[in-house]
Image: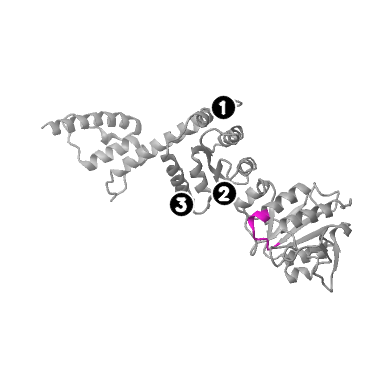
């Protein structure tokens, strides 16, 4: 008896709301009096739909009743309100530390936060299958990845607790919050797992990856129009630490473009970014499916093709000179081979001149050569110090 009374009272309240809705929507058949209190499930659904969805109040013939639709609409409205509240709370006053940053300094997360952060990273990677996210680590790579707008950042993870780099970490966190990127404090073991045990300096950024640039641009950009251009061409450099060091030296010394083969070279990974001290986030690396075709085009345009070999190597078709004896007199391509075998034979045959770095002492057997990143820095400095104007 009590159940029936409650149902009647609920139906009566619903009828009053429907009567008000009918006056607004023009649906006259929705009103119900006190004698018509026993609604069927289908009738209750139809009337409630007219109340909340007046445009869809006239159902199609044969439409089945589905009460879960109302729950779904309610949840969507709830989630939309939550997103609006989150976006409003993320806004902070300019020039002041937000409450999130203050929590970063004074509050510690529980130990369970480590597992939660890893699970969150895994879930976001699954939800973004078309956009494979990766973990950028280190202060300079994370800061530059946020400021250069070449990646799409998802979340910044920062080591909990105080340390000597706390002010630097706060600066990166503030930059992330300013750009609407969530910041989450985790423990050092969690960061170690995220980046595979590499040196993260207390920061990991989950973001979209960087790819090789493929858009062809004119050789003479506004920055290089008054001097001889130098392009660094990397043939099969596969070690990420070497590639990162090469990018850092090339950027510092003023190389006009860095080109690399795509298929047999190291990709632009977070390890490369860390080894380059974040330079990979700033400068573009152009990828070519065929270095041979690109070099051929530049040679036809009048560029000089310069290769590099060891001291003991020579070629009957090309001259081998000490790098200190060579001077740039026109646009130049400097070809650097990868670890182990150096330049491929087909690229070596395209060189106008081959350069080598002579040692300053008698070398012990087995240590007759330099690391490719060290050799690249020496050769770039030697060539660019002799570059003359156009």
Estimate how packed mark 1 is, as few (under 14), some (14 to 19) or many (20 or more) residues with alpha carbons within 10 Å: few
Q: Seen in the image, is 245 located left or right of residue 42?
A: right
| Membership of 239 in magenta stretch | yes
Circle nearer the viewer, 2 or 1: 2
Circle nearer the viewer, 2 or 3: 2
Disc 2 element: loop
Q: How is the image coloured?
A: one colour
Estimate how packed mark 3 is, as few (under 14), some (14 to 19) or many (20 or more) residues with alpha carbons within 10 Å: few
Asked whether the beta carbons under mark 2 and mark 1 sit within 8 Å of each other, the answer is no
Disc 1 element: loop
- Residue 20: where, in percent of width, then height? 30, 28
Q: Which of the pair 263/222 is nearer the observer?
A: 263
Q: Which residues are magenta?
A: 235-243
Question: Where is residue 97, by image quadrant?
Answer: top right
Estimate how packed mark 2 is, as few (under 14), some (14 to 19) or many (20 or more) residues with alpha carbons within 10 Å: some
* Disc marking residue 286: none
Against 383, residue 183 (above or below) is above
Residue at 76% across, 63% down: 364
- Residue 384: where, in percent of width, then height? 83, 52
| Membership of 328 in magenta stretch | no
- Residue 235: where, in percent of width, then height? 71, 63
Question: Where is residue 56, by image quadrant?
Answer: top left
Q: Which residue is mark 1?
A: 97
* Residue 13 visible in the shown view: yes
Looking at marks 2 and 1 on the same chain, the residue that comes earlier in the sequence is marked by: 1
Residue at 52% across, 32% down: 104
Asked whether the beta carbons under mark 3 and mark 1 sit within 8 Å of each other, the answer is no
Disc 3 element: helix
Looking at marks 2 and 3 on the same chain, the residue that comes earlier in the sequence is marked by: 3
Q: Which residue is mark 2?
A: 198
Q: Which residue is mark 3?
A: 126
Q: Seen in the image, is 47 located left or right of residue 82?
A: left
């Amino acid at each position: 008896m009590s159940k029936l009374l409650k149902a009647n009272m609920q139906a009566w309240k619903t009828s009053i709301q429907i009567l008000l809705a009918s006056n607004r929507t023009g649906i006259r058949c929705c009103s119900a009096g006190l004698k018509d209190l026993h609604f069927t499930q289908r009738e209750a659904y139809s009337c409630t739909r007219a109340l909340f969805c007046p445009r869809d109040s006239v159902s199609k013939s044969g439409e089945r009743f589905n009460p879960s639709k109302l729950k779904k609409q309610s949840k969507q409205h709830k989630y939309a309100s939550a997103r609006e509240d989150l976006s409003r709370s993320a806004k902070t006053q300019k020039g002041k530390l937000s409450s999130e940053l203050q929590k970063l300094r004074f509050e510690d997360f529980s130990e369970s936060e480590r597992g939660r952060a890893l699970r969150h990273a895994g879930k976001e990677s699954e939800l973004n299958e078309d956009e494979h996210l990766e973990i950028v680590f280190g202060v300079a790579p994370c800061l530059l990845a946020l400021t250069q707008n070449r990646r799409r950042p998802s979340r910044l993870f920062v080591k909990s607790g105080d340390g000597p780099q706390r002010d630097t970490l706060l600066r990166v966190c503030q930059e992330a919050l300013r750009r609407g990127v969530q910041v989450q404090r985790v423990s050092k073991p969690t960061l170690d797992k995220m980046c595979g045990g590499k040196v993260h300096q207390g920061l990991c950024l989950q973001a979209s990856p960087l790819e090789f640039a493929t858009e062809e641009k004119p050789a003479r950009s506004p920055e290089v129009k008054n001097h001889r251009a130098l392009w660094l061409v990397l043939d099969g450099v596969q070690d990420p630490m070497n590639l990162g060091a090469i990018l850092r030296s090339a950027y510092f010394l003023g190389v006009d473009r860095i080109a690399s083969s795509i298929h047999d070279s190291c990709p632009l990974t977070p390890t490369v970014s860390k080894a380059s001290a974040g330079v990979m986030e700033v400068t573009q690396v152009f990828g070519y499916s065929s270095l041979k075709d690109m070099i051929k085009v530049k040679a036809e345009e009048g560029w000089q093709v310069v290769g590099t070999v060891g001291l003991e190597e020579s070629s009957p078709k090309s001259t081998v000179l000490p790098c200190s004896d060579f001077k740039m007199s026109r646009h130049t391509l400097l070809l650097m081979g990868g670890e182990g075998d150096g330049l491929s034979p087909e690229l070596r045959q395209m060189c106008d001149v081959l350069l080598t770095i002579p040692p300053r002492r008698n070398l012990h057997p087995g240590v007759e050569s330099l690391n490719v990143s060290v050799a690249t820095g020496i050769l770039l400095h030697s060539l660019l110090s002799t570059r003359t104007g156009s």
